[in-house]
């Protein structure tokens, strides 16, 4: 009997071009010697250190580790290329025998799929999207021929900007036995869930993402393919060995360590996209603004050539997409900064050029951000005790992420946590250091504690029977009366939970008494996190009347 792992390997092997199946890759000096040595005389490099005299890592482990945490994807499922263009080209080289195969792509779409196909002598079959740019799976599946090896989808699609219907994509995955590429270059602007989580279920699925758009690294040229590990392995074998340079890897790792900045910028661009779309729809020169889930808008103008030259005369360049299928009269406008967008709108005749963006947090909000870097972990946390927003949590431990989300949701606060930790050792440092950073961050956001409730308690919760008593009075006392049946819950060892709350209490400087019982470890600990969140909510809440510190001493 074949297990699913072997089944996937066999299915992918059958799809590969025959000459690729048994290819012996070039073996780099770094592949041959992975140990850390003192003196490197194996790669004919220059020995004089100028920062770039050594070859880069061919497998980019540091970058993959960060992306794995941020995206919740296993490192073995990630391939990194020189922009998305590299995995696009590799798909043809791996799966399409030149001169005797075809690919089906939606149209209109990103032009590189066609170019890469033609370079590889693969015939392109267009499958037009509907008049509203929607995907009809049956119509696309009807275009498939015997020699069709690959389908290219792009969601959100360029240049139309819309997300493709997930169920229609799933129909294609369920009915096509070859390779389906879903290019998600713009997914971060859409709020939609990536399809990357499905690569184990569908071994022929390859999801492309890039650091060029939301992450602001177009100049570095780093694209990502998420796929079954058998595809990732073969892509890694036939790529150019050193496809991402040392400075690019270093700079990307640096920029990935500040994901909050990216999140804020994406939120700003999405707000701006909606503002522009609203205003453009009111301008007399505009015929239609298409709905967008990306960082650009496709806009149909009555006299697009005049608009294009008018903008150019004012120093603003946009992309003419009018020759693409169903895009007559359309220009594609990338969302810029609020000031840039105002300039574009005023050239187009908008008479109220004042930025309405109000993304600056209310200064009365109790906010804090903390970062903590050791040899073992790098943690960043930010909180806003006065505003709820969906939590953004990425620690590389899925169960722990789920528990931290409970704190954000049930305390009704903004809570973002990212930790790049030494999970190859175990979960200890990650959990402990997140607890410390979280405690410090809450403590710092509380400020002088004026007006707060100070105490929180919570009642037993359903069958989990969790009770959490909390006093933010400034002294620390930690009690834990919880027993678990097993050693692990999800990917977290249960003994780390008391350690987490103890470290948190020490750094938040609070009394924290936790009691819980039940039959199912998952329910017990989820009850504890929720009850803690509820207790925290009561304790940090500021009363609208009182502004004094809730202590007869006058300070906490
Ligand atoms: N995919 C799509 C849909 C794009 O629009 C673009 C760039 N315009 C890319 C991929 C290219 O991304 P990269 O910079 O990673 O090569």
Image: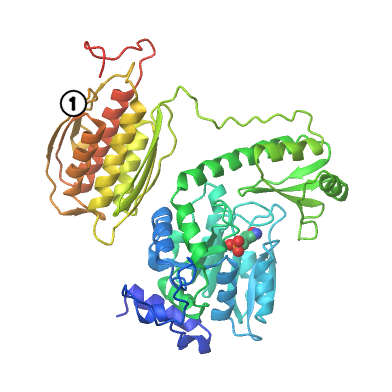
Task: Using the image as rendered, state which of residue 48 and residue 196 is in the foreground.
Answer: 48
The residue at 63%/39% (across/down) is 272
The residue at 21%/40% (across/down) is 503
For disc 1, the marked residue is: 475
Q: Is residue 253 above or below residue 271?
A: below
Task: Using the image as rendered, state which of residue 70 and residue 158 is in the foreground.
Answer: 70
Mark 1, other Cα within 10 Å: few <14 / some 14–19 / many ≥20:
some
The residue at 65%/68% (across/down) is 105
Q: Residue 119: horizontal and vertical position, in percent?
A: 68, 78
Q: Residue 389: horizontal and vertical position, in percent?
A: 44, 35
Image side of residue 347 versus residue 34, left or right: right
Task: Using the image as rendered, state which of residue 151 and residue 196 is in the foreground.
Answer: 196
| Any part of residue 542 in sight | yes
Most extreme residue toward the front, as rendered?
Answer: 48
Query: Quadrant location of ligand 1?
Result: bottom right
Q: Secondary structure at mark 1?
A: loop
Q: Is residue 20 above or below residue 442?
A: below
Image side of residue 360 versus residue 406, left or right: right
Q: Quadrant of the N terminus?
A: bottom left
Task: Using the image as rendered, state which of residue 222 and residue 84 is in the foreground.
Answer: 222
């Amino acid at each position: 009997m074949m297990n699913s792992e072997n089944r996937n390997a066999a299915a992918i092997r059958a799809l590969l071009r025959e000459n690729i199946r048994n290819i012996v890759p070039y073996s780099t000096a770094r592949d041959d010697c992975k140990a850390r040595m003192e003196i490197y005389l194996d790669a004919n490099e220059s020995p004089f250190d100028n920062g770039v005299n050594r070859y880069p890592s061919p497998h980019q482990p540091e970058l993959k580790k960060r992306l794995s945490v941020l995206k919740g994807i296993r490192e073995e499922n990630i391939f990194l290329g020189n922009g998305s263009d590299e995995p696009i080209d590799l798909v043809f080289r791996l799966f399409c025998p030149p001169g005797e195969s075809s690919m089906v792509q939606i149209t209109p779409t990103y032009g590189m799929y066609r170019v890469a196909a033609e370079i590889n002598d693969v015939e392109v079959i267009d499958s037009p999207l509907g008049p509203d740019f929607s995907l009809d799976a049956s119509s696309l599946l009807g275009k498939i021929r015997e020699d069709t090896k690959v389908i290219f989808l792009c969601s959100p699609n360029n240049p139309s900007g819309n997300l493709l219907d997930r169920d229609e994509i799933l129909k294609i995955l369920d009915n096509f036995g070859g390779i389906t590429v879903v290019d998600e270059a713009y997914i971060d602007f859409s709020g939609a869930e990536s399809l990357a989580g499905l690569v184990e279920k569908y071994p022929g699925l390859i999801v492309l993402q890039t650091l060029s758009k939301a992450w602001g690294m177009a100049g570095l040229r780093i694209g990502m393919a998420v796929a079954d590990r058998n595809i990732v392995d073969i892509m890694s074998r036939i790529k150019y060995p050193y496809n991402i340079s040392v400075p690019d890897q270093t700079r990307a790792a640096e920029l990935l360590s500040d994901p909050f900045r990216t999140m804020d910028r994406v939120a700003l661009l999405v707000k701006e996209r909606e503002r522009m779309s609203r205003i453009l729809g009111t301008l007399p020169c505009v015929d239609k603004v298409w709905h967008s889930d990306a960082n650009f808008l496709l806009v149909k103008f009555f006299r697009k050539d005049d608009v294009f030259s008018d903008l150019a005369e004012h120093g603003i360049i946009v992309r003419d997409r009018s020759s693409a299928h169903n895009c007559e009269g359309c220009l594609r406008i990338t969302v810029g900064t609020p000031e840039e967008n105002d300039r574009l709108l005023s050239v187009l005749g908008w008479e109220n050029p004042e930025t309405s963006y109000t993304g600056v947090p209310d200064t009365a909000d109790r906010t804090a951000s903390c970062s903590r870097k050791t040899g073992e972990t790098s943690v960043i946390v930010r909180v806003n005790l006065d505003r709820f927003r969906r939590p953004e949590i990425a620690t590389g431990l899925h169960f722990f992420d789920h528990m931290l989300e409970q704190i954000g949701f049930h305390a009704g606060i903004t809570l973002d946590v990212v930790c790049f930790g030494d999970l190859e050792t175990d979960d200890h440092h990650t959990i402990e250091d997140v607890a410390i950073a979280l405690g410090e961050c809450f403590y710092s956001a509380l400020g002088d504690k004026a007006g707060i409730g100070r105490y929180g308690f919570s009642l037993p919760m359903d069958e989990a029977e969790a009770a959490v008593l909390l006093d933010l009075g400034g002294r620390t006392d930690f009690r834990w009366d919880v027993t678990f049946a097993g050693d692990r819950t999800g990917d977290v060892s249960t003994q780390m939970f008391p350690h987490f709350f103890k470290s948190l209490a020490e750094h938040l400087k609070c009394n924290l008494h936790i009691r819980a019982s039940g039959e199912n470890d998952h329910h017990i600990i989820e009850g504890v996190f929720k009850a803690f969140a509820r207790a925290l909510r009561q304790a940090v809440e500021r009363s609208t009347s009182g502004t004094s510190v809730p202590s007869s001493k006058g300070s906490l």
